Image (spheres, rainbow, N blue to C red):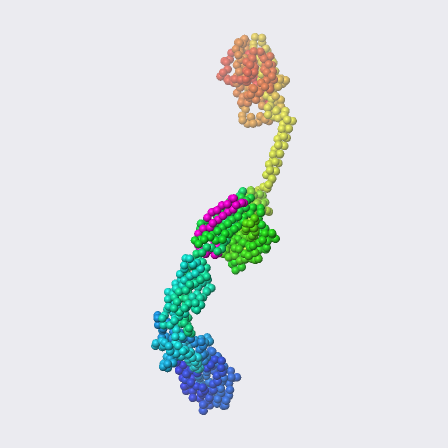
Amino acid sequence: MDTLHHFFLLLMFMHYAVGSNSTCVKILPDSISKIPVEVGKNFTATCHLLEGSGYTSDDIEWLLKNISIAKQYYHKINETSVSVTVNVSSNMNGWLVCQASRKSLSFKKRCTYGILLDAGYPPLKPENLTCIAMQEGKDISSDLKCSWEFESRDPLLDTTYTLYATICLDNSKYYDICNQRLAKTCTVNLSTFPFAMDVKVWVEVKNLLGSVRSDELLCNDALNFVKPNPPLDVRVLSEVNFSTSLVVTWKHPTDIFKLSYVIRYCQVDSDVWTEVPESFTQARTESFRLQSLEPYTEYVVQMRCIREHRQSYWSDWSANATVRTAEAAPKSTPDLWRVIQPTSDNRKVTLVWKPPVKANGEIFKYHLRIIQDDRNNTTETDVIYQNYYSTMLPPGKVANIELTAVNSAGGSPKATLFIPRSHQELPGVRNVSWSVRDKELQVEWSGVSPSSVPLTEYLVEWVNVQQRDLKPHWQRVPHNVNTTTLTGFEKLERYNISVYPIYKHHVHGVLHIQAGSPVTRAAYIQQGSPLEGPIVTVDNKSKKNSVELTWEEIPLDSRCGFITKYTIFYMAGNTEHWQSVTVNADVRSHVLTELASETDYVVRIMASTVAGSKNGSDFHFKTMKYGDGEVEVIVVVVCLSFLFLTVFIIMFCLRKREVIKQLLWPQVPDPSDSSIAHWSPDFPVKANMPKEDVSVVEVDMFDGKSLCEEDKAVLPLKKDKYLSEEHSSGIGGSSCMSSPRHSVSDSDESDSGQTTASTVQYSSVVASGYKGQTPNHQPPVFARSESTQPLLDCEEHPDLLNESGGHSRNSYFRRGRELEPGVLTQECDELNGSSLTFCPVQEEEMSPVVEDPPASTVCYMPQQNGYRPQ
């Protein structure tokens, strides 16, 4: 690459200096290679027009990197020479060109010449030259490695560093060249290390802008360049009966010269070292005892060495040797505390403690002593490999707790704690606040109220309430300090911070260390959005225009911070517009009002913290159609209306009972009560013939009077009308047989309630015997009529007849018996017994025509306003 670079520069130089027009101009200074120039200084070059060029100094132009240089930097020397002066900068590496040209047609050629500039800095003088000869095994290396310092400025030019070493006794000269632009080290080989000889060392630096030489490093003895190896096989030993001391042993790294040693030690995980001066370790010593150490403490020990009584180099530190001192009895008390949890009729006291700060060994048990009320009620126990103990203490009793930590070397001083009665606690602090700073919890509090019991310190307790075991952590603060910083908190988890004042006093010669009333605050080191939202329910049945919503607190593990507010979102099911209501964080229910009746709604609740919010699940409900009391009012109104209507109907029926009676039970005449006498204009009555009794009753079915009334007047007979009909009936036949027979259809029954009455044929009563014959003593025959006229109510229900109209009906039959004794006797008997039976009269049942017709025949035919006889 260097060859190509130089070849390229040669071509450029030939382009600018060897062309056909190169003889008309020339630059001074001139060189076929780079011309070094020092950065920050002025550089001046002169351009000369050669004889016969035809140009003048006014035709000369200077260019640097093909960029024209301003005329103000030109200096006209004469008509053929012009110089230019520029200030050299670090980026001025390139061609400086002088060009002669004219804009005239007679001068079509131009003259050009250039030089190549190389900007840089001269070399700097090396400072602080040092050389070291390393120990290799038991001997010393012949390589002398030297280093120096200088300003860290890039010379920008190729620079050569040469290290020289000369042995003063035989003037042997050794050197090594380091071709590096910024070299700071170099190594020269002396073939054999010159023991007990003087050596002179220096460094020379060169580049195109100059050279410089360091100060000579003169040594009276070459061993001063030697750096020994660290002590070998360094060991640290502990002794059982010496808990505050350690024994250090090692081996010498070389036998060429005497060495002095330095020992340093520190506790594990500490960066504070303690050194044992070299004067305490003699040259040939290979052991040393470290004293005044802490018992049962792990220490790290290191060693290094140097040539004794000479200016030389220290060896490196040896590898770490770690050991623990032996155990001793604890020197400090355990840190005793308590957690009191009241129950229904007792107190659960959990004693917790931390090991002594100066345990001086491994604590394998704690001796616990609990004294209640007086020393006669004392409980002693050993707690092995645990740091808590639970007991029950009634609210009305006191207890004094004593705790001692025990290791293999003995027991610690006892820690005491007094638990008073529930109502005898000492005053607490006045206020507690907290803040978060750099992921640490800063707790502040105000002092306690004045008390006769002296205050000794404060205890700050914090408990992660999201953990099931509620393991407390605590920190003690001096009594004259009212702030502290707590660490070790988990983000998004809730802690209770409590501050207790600690009092110390003597009662009856017994020391009581007692905690005052706590002041507790909840805290988060970092808050986040809740993991879940509230679950909303409708507490009671929804109302017409309102509903009461209730929800529970979000579980503590899902809150991730303090809930600042709840936002209730709701909308009707047929819309997409959400409405919202915001309530405080301590609210657990809310009544939504101004809702539409009989409408489906969707509701959800969003819980918010300072870091974010979370929506709960949707809940659907429907408002009622009627409001509270509306259904009851409607029911009461309907019931009252029905009651009033019922009373009105009853009163109306009572007032109109006769009209209703005639409408429901029309009067129907009883055939047995006919008042028609034995008469006939064409058939006079004969003594030897049975009497013929014909009764015709005209009855209006809707005249409102009972057919069974006893005082019913006998309707007048229509004799003339019926006489011709009787004679047309034929011999031996009944007028009932020859008269038209009417049947009552369903439609007739339905029209029975109208005012137009119907005449119905009931029966033919045939007496025994014929005309001209004496009747036998046989019971009369009753023939059923073919009429479909329904029977009277009194006929179908003889029990009613006997109760209400029995007397009236019997009167009708009595009249018939008066007219014809013996004929209707059976009829009356049957009526009085149960009901009247009518036998239909059929033609085939009729007796053949005889000379004497039946003595008596009674027929009833329906007519417009009653019955007529046939």
Q: Position of residue 165 (x, y in %)?
A: 39, 79
> Where does the magenta region start and end?
355-382
Image-based side of 11 in relation to 57, left or right: left
As drawn, the residue found furthest toward the bottom would be: 51
- In percent of the image, x 44 and y 62: which residue is there? 291
Image-based side of 750 in relation to 195, left or right: right
Q: Position of residue 20 (x, y in %)?
A: 41, 87
Dividing the picture into quadrants, the one containing residue 727 is top right
Instruction: Tally the numbered discs.
Output: 0
Q: Is residue 866 magenta?
A: no
> Could one spot residue 127 in this view of the protein?
yes
The quadrant the N terminus occupies is: bottom left
Dividing the picture into quadrants, the one containing residue 323 is bottom left
Given residues 276 and 93, the one toward you in this image is 276
**Position above or below: 843 against 372:** above
Given residues 800 and 38, the one toward you in this image is 38
- In percent of the image, x 59 and y 21: which residue is there? 668
Q: Position of residue 131 (x, y in %)?
A: 41, 75
